[in-house]
């Protein structure tokens, strides 16, 4: 067999072990913490299950310490069904999203440092480089700060502001990112924080030249349909190398 034939028959990289849904949520939390989604105890991830329950990270654990056995299960009213810990009162945001958008499987809310700067400015950052262009479509901006999203009314306003967008900035607060699966939600979270960080640095220097909108639509549309190939798996393998007990 030639080298070309051998490569054609091989996967992109070593496969991940069999992962339970809870393990996938724990890995996503670890992966996003490394990307800057690390505002202490803030932030929540939900993952819709076939029985219409939601898996969610616990309230009192940081995202870089959570394990599969820590993941909570709640119903669509926000009541805890299974798990050893507590769930954030702000889970109302996710409950209202999943009720309104049955097409969404995964939702992520946190206060990553660079995206939160732009949320504080109430401004969507331009796309200044190729990596920032890997998600097409507008970033929604919810430009009304009403405090936390614990209450139903405030949560519904944030969900309405998201609309059909994939990513949103919540004014003076943080980000809200959604996806039809874990890989796409991860890809969008990574891209949004990269875009916000790069734009901040470019504008600090001045005279930045944004990427043409037609390129973003074409390039980001192609990537976002499937998420960046192999990215979720590669970042998950990195977390498993660092701490295999994430699967416990």
Image: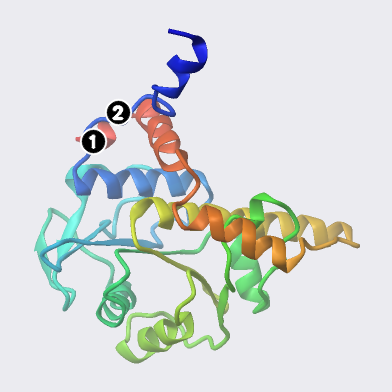
Which residue: 48% across, 52% down? 187
Q: Which residue is mark 2?
A: 244
Which residue: 45% across, 48% down? 33
Q: Secondary structure at mark 1?
A: helix
Q: Is residue 204 visible?
A: yes
Indicate the quadrant containing the N terminus: top left, top right, bottom left or bottom right.
top left
Binning the other alpha carbons within 10 Å of mark 2 as few (below 14), some (14 to 19) or many (20 upward) gives few
Q: Which residue is mark 1?
A: 247
Q: How many marks?
A: 2
Tell me where residue 177 appears, x and y as whole percent. Answer: 45, 66
Residues under labels 2 and 1: Cα distance?
6 Å
Tell me where residue 208 appears, x and y as whole percent. Answer: 86, 60
Toward the top, the furthest residue is: 1
Q: Nearer the viewer, residue 220 or 90?
A: 220
Toward the bottom, the furthest residue is: 153
Q: Nearer the viewer, residue 115 or 140?
A: 140
Tell me where residue 204 appears, x and y as whole percent. Answer: 83, 60
Residue 18 as seen in the image, left or right of residue 2: left
Q: Is residue 192 visible?
A: no
Res 103 → quadrant: bottom left
Q: Nearer the viewer, residue 31 or 126?
A: 126
Q: Nearer the viewer, residue 38 or 170?
A: 170
Residue 91 as seen in the image, left or right of residue 242: left
Tell me where residue 159 appears, x and y as whole percent. Answer: 40, 82
Q: Are marks 2 and 1 in contact (CB under 8 Å)?
A: yes
């Amino acid at each position: 067999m030639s080298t070309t034939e051998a490569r054609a028959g091989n996967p992109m990289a070593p496969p991940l072990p069999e992962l339970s849904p809870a393990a996938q949520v724990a890995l996503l939390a670890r992966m996003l913490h490394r990307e800057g989604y690390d505002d202490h105890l803030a932030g929540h991830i939900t993952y819709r299950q076939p029985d219409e329950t939601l898996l969610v990270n616990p309230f009192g654990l940081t995202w870089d310490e959570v394990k599969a056995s820590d993941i909570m299960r709640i119903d669509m009213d926000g009541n805890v069904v299974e798990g050893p810990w507590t769930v954030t009162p702000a889970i109302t945001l996710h409950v209202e999203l999943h009720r309104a958008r049955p097409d969404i499987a995964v939702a992520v809310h946190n206060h990553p440092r660079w995206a939160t700067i732009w949320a504080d400015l109430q401004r969507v950052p331009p796309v200044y480089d190729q990596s920032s262009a890997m998600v097409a479509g507008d970033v929604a901006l919810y430009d009304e700060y009403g405090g936390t999203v614990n209450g139903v009314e405030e949560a519904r306003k944030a969900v309405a502001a998201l609309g059909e967008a994939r990513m949103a900035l919540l004014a003076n607060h943080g980000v809200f990112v959604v996806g039809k699966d874990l890989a796409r939600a991860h890809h969008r979270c990574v891209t949004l924080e990269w875009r916000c960080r790069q734009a901040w640095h470019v504008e600090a220097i001045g005279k930045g030249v944004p990427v043409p909108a037609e390129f973003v639509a074409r390039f980001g549309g192609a990537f976002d349909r499937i998420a960046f190939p192999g990215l979720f798996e590669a970042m998950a393998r990195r977390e498993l190398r660092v701490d295999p007990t994430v699967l416990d």
